[in-house]
């Protein structure tokens, strides 16, 4: 079975993050040794949606955490049982499936109890009163199955088995002292004892050893509505087995049940298990009307495997998925600064100073003799155009240009026409709220002890945001306090005029303006030629903050 590996871009994904994950997953799956799943860590922006729709590529699935959940564990996938099955059948199911427990459900497949081996064994060890079959509600079907019996006489209206269980291994004169109406009689091949039992209006007679039953006894049983069955077992074995015909709901645990859902995190499961003493716990599917899907035990927690991930377009924990520290990171493919992702083992780490991670992904494919499909070549080309702003960004390199031309030939793409169409679709701000603008491309950077949030909005019509500026500043201040940012910056980037208006909030917001040799006016300043957050914004801010800390 192939192991699953998640290909993960950064939070608040841009086109490069999404397209890199999709393309690298195709490459990895083509090698045939893993099951690579591309995922996204947030809502896609309009530009990315346009790209995927244009080339007919499905969106990667949304993944909120890589912390282990119950669904990730190899728990026992056992079908639940009906409450009326016999103890013997329940025990056989446990032995056959190497289980300690069985979930019990009603006719609507809702959990009503859990039966354990301890429950069943206790029922054998306890000294049962001889009226236990009636009290437990055991059925003739359970009794026949448990005793491997043959039904000889089954009345249309079966008498309830409310009497006591008697083994008629005594003289006839002694039998009459003990036997009463509706009793369950276990007897051998003695006709005189059988006749006394039938004439006493018992409810059930069990004849052992497959003995031949006289026709007159059969007729009497039919006339008196007495159930009569024949078992191959001897009398001792029959008397020992018959209590195993009780329904499992008579011994199962019904109250204070502890169960877990498929999406419950393993950490929470461990805490809950530490407070209880059960050996196994039912697992239910919340998305399927709480249907029971199996059982989980402490063993499954101990033997669980970490999820495996490959990071693309980032290598910073604050930009990555929740629970990353619990994963095995296999590879990192990125074009940003080397940050703070730690790994337990040596990994394949490819970091190049190019304008787009998609350039690196495409290079890996070609270096290994792999030609991307037309669709994948298209989204890689689009991601390079997006991340380099069609080579207007200072992060652009000649390697990006060469790779874009090669991919465009495979995708049969007119670069300039497509870029204009993509930027128009992606930079439309119609109907967007300040909160949506702040979240569509937000990255968090930890510089010394400062937490800096930098959002970027690319637009072809910067004037459309003038009326929204005051609302943006209010929303930025709220988000800054909520997320604990020292400084929060919004880059309103004019793609074609190659400049950005820098809107800044925070206690030390003046530091940002000073880093660019500017002063703030209504929380903002104009930065001509500034297009790249990675190359033109983070370095001067880092230098400014570092210098302040030294003073």
Image (cartoon, rainbow, N blue to C red):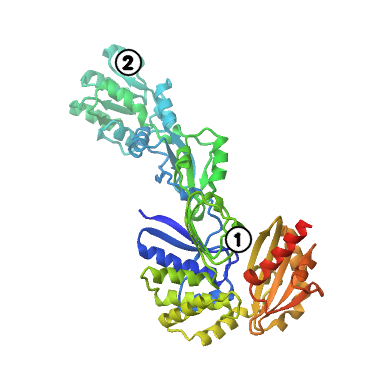
Is disc 2 surrounded by few (<14), some (14 to 19) or many (20+) residues within 10 Å? Answer: some
Residue 112 on image: x %, y %: 49, 41
Q: Secondary structure at mark 2?
A: helix
**Residue at 65% over, 62% down:** 444
Mark 1 element type: helix
Q: Which mark is nearer the camera, 2 or 1?
A: 1
Depicted 480 relative to depicted 206: above or below: below
Q: Which residue is mark 1?
A: 319
Observer able to see residue 382: no
Residue 200 visible at all:
yes
Q: Is residue 215 left or right of residue 246?
A: left
Closest to the observer, 453 or 39: 453
- Residue at image position (48%, 69%) is 360
Coordinates of residue 344 in the picture (x, y in percent): 51, 48
Asked which quadrant contains residue 450, the reply is: bottom right
Can you say whether 258 is above or below 228 in the image?
below
Q: Nearer the viewer, residue 155 or 412?
A: 412
As drawn, is 496 to the left or to the right of 80?
Answer: right
Check disc 2 and report the residue beneath it. 176
Image quadrant containing the C terminus: bottom right
5 or 415, which is in the foreground? 415
The answer to whether residue 358 is above or below residue 67 is below
Locate residue 84, reporting x and y percent.
40, 38
* Residue at 59% from the left image edge and 63% from the top image edge: 337
């Amino acid at each position: 079975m192939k192991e699953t590996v998640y290909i993960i871009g950064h939070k608040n994904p841009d086109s490069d993050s999404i397209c890199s994950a999709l393309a690298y997953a195709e490459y990895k799956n083509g090698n045939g040794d893993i099951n690579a799943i591309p995922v996204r860590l947030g809502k896609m922006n309009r530009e990315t949606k346009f790209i995927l729709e244009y080339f007919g590529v499905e969106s990667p699935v949304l993944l909120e955490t890589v912390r282990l959940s119950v669904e990730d564990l190899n728990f026992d996938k056992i079908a639940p049982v009906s409450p009326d099955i016999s103890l013997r059948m329940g025990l056989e199911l446990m032995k056959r499936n190497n289980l300690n427990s069985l979930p019990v459900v009603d006719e609507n497949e809702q959990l009503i109890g859990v039966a354990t081996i301890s429950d069943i064994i206790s029922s054998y060890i306890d000294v049962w009163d001889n009226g236990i079959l009636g009290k437990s509600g055991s059925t003739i079907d359970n009794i026949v199955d448990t005793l491997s019996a043959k039904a000889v006489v089954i009345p249309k209206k079966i008498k309830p088995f409310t009497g006591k269980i008697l083994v008629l291994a005594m003289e006839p004169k002694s039998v009459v002292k003990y036997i009463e109406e509706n009793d369950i009689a276990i007897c051998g091949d003695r006709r005189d004892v059988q006749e006394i039992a039938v004439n006493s209006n018992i409810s059930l007679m069990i004849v052992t050893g497959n003995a031949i039953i006289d026709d007159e006894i059969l007729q009497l049983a039919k006339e008196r509505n007495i159930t009569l069955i024949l078992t191959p077992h001897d009398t001792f074995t029959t008397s020992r087995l018959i209590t195993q015909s009780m329904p499992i709901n008579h011994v199962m645990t019904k109250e204070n049940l502890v169960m877990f859902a498929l999406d419950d995190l393993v950490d929470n499961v461990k805490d809950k298990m530490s407070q209880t003493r059960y050996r196994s716990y039912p697992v239910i599917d919340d998305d399927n009307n709480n249907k029971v899907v199996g059982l989980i035990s402490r063993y499954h927690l101990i033997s669980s495997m970490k999820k495996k991930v490959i990071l693309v377009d980032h290598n910073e924990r604050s930009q990555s998925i929740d629970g990353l520290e619990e994963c095995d990171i296999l590879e990192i493919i990125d074009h940003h600064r080397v940050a703070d992702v730690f790994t337990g083992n040596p990994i394949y780490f490819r970091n190049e100073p190019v304008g787009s991670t998609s350039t690196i992904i495409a290079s890996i494919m070609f270096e290994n003799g792999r030609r991307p499909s037309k669709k994948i070549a298209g989204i890689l080309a689009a991601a390079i155009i997006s991340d380099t702003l069609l080579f207007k960004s200072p992060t652009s390199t000649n390697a990006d240009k060469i790779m874009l031309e090669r991919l465009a030939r495979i995708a049969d793409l007119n670069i300039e026409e497509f870029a204009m169409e993509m930027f128009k679709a992606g930079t439309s701000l119609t109907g967007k709220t300040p909160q949506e603008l702040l979240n569509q491309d937000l990255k968090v950077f930890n510089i010394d002890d400062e937490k800096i949030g930098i959002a970027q909005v690319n637009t072809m019509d910067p004037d459309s945001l003038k009326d929204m500026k005051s609302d943006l500043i209010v929303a930025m201040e709220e988000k800054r306090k909520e997320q604990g940012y020292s400084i929060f910056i919004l880059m309103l980037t004019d793609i074609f005029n190659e400049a950005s208006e820098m809107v800044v909030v925070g206690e030390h917001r003046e530091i940002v303006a000073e880093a660019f040799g500017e002063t703030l006016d209504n929380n903002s300043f104009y930065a001509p030629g500034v297009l790249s957050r990675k190359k033109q914004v983070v370095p001067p801010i880092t230098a400014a903050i570092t210098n302040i800390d030294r003073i």
